[in-house]
Amino acid sequence: MNLALSESEMAESPLMLIDDNCGNLHLLSCVLQWAGFTNLRSYTCARSALNDLATFDPHLIILDLSMPGMNGYEFLHRVREAAPPNAFTPILVYTADLTPEARNRALELGASDFLTKPGDAIEIKLRVRNFLRTRKMHTDVIDQNHLLEERVRERTEHLQLAWREAVELLGAACDYRDDDTGRHTHRVGELSAEIAAELGCSAAFVESIRLVAPLHDVGKIAIPDAILHKPSRLTDDEYESMKAHVEIGAALLSQKTSPLLQMGMDIAKYHHERWDGGGYCEGISGEGIPLCARIVCVADAFDAMTNDRPYRKGWTAERALFELNTCAGAQFDPEVVAAINRVMHEAVTSDRMAA
């Protein structure tokens, strides 16, 4: 960051001069031209100057106080009201009124300093140059802050992307143990997000459940293949071993402080709970089951029913929805089932047309 202001930048800095006295205005212009400043714009009307502020964008304003119509005090007030955040345009009050009242009022309204009419040419030159340097330092610091904020934003986005990809890869890796296509967890995540949106959940909740719903069966990484891939019905002991995946998954995610992974923990632990309390692992019921888990429970069941398994062909969407509706109020949250019915309306219509 270069805080210095070159001589060419100094000379070309836009200066706005406001004084209703043409003689004073001419004298001030001559002094500034003698001092090497070339980009001057003079006004005998403060209102006209105010109207040109945005287009001219002065780096310094030299302002008379006592003027007809809009005086210098009102101009200061209007400039302060219109100034964007972090803006800094120095205003030198150029006046013959040296009373403490005039000085205090002008400073309260945002004046930067005072020049006494008619003024000393050397003093005017030095004051103007010093304020232009101060403004340059201010704008450079603001620009540097914006640059740093942009770099932080970009790095944060990169970290979030990497983190999201890691979560997605973990879900997909688990999926390959239980689904040859490796797409089950992805489908459950997308459908869970659609159901959540249909239920009116916040955008943050919808995006979070899209990301972590694929981790619902993460605990299956600890289940033996002989049980996980058994083509026939599980024995009671095997079924008990299979049920352990919910506690294993919750344990894997329970030490994480991220709110996102805390949702993942709730999903992993409670997505096999039943609305009537007959599920596992804690046997909780109704709204005592976290909403995210109730949603994933329905999405997981629907996807399992509508996709092929080694022991059966996948059902149509209509047949799967019939099963969900039959079990609503017992196994599944009725409101979540109603939501998936609305989400899948087009799929059911397509199935009927194909038939």
Image: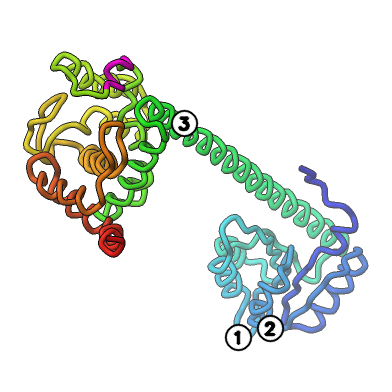
**On the image, numbered disc 2 is attached to which residue?**
45
Please, what is the three-letter code of the amino acid marked with disc 2? Cys
- C-alpha separation, residue under disc 1 versus residue under disc 2: 8 Å
For disc 1, the neighbor class at 10 Å (few under 14, some 14 to 19, many from 20) is few
* Image quarter (top left, top right, bottom left or bottom right) of the C terminus: bottom left
Residue 112 relative to residue 208: left or right: right
Q: Secondary structure at mark 2?
A: loop
Choose top left, top right, bottom left or bottom right for residue 205.
Answer: top left
Marking on residue 169: 3
Quarter of the N terminus within the rendering? top right
Q: Is residue 228 within the magenta segment?
A: yes
User: Going from the N terminus, do you reach mark 1 or mark 2 first?
Assistant: 2
Q: Nearer the viewer, residue 273 or 30?
A: 273
> Which residue is drawn at the image coordinates 82% and 47% (left, top)?
4
Residue stretch rendered in magenta on the structure: 224-230
Q: Position of residue 68 (x, y in %)?
A: 63, 85
According to the picture, the residue beneath numbered tag 1 turns out to be 69
190 or 16, which lies in front?
190
The span from disc 3 to disc 2 (Cα, nearest Å) is 67 Å
- The local crowd at label 2, few if under 14, some if 14 to 19, many if 20 or more residues have their Cα within 10 Å, is some
Q: Is residue 227 visible to the viewer in this orientation of the structure?
A: yes
Q: Residue at left 38%, top 46%?
A: 207
Quick one: SS at disc 1? Answer: loop
The local secondary structure at tag 3 comes to helix
Depicted 161 relative to depicted 11: above or below: above
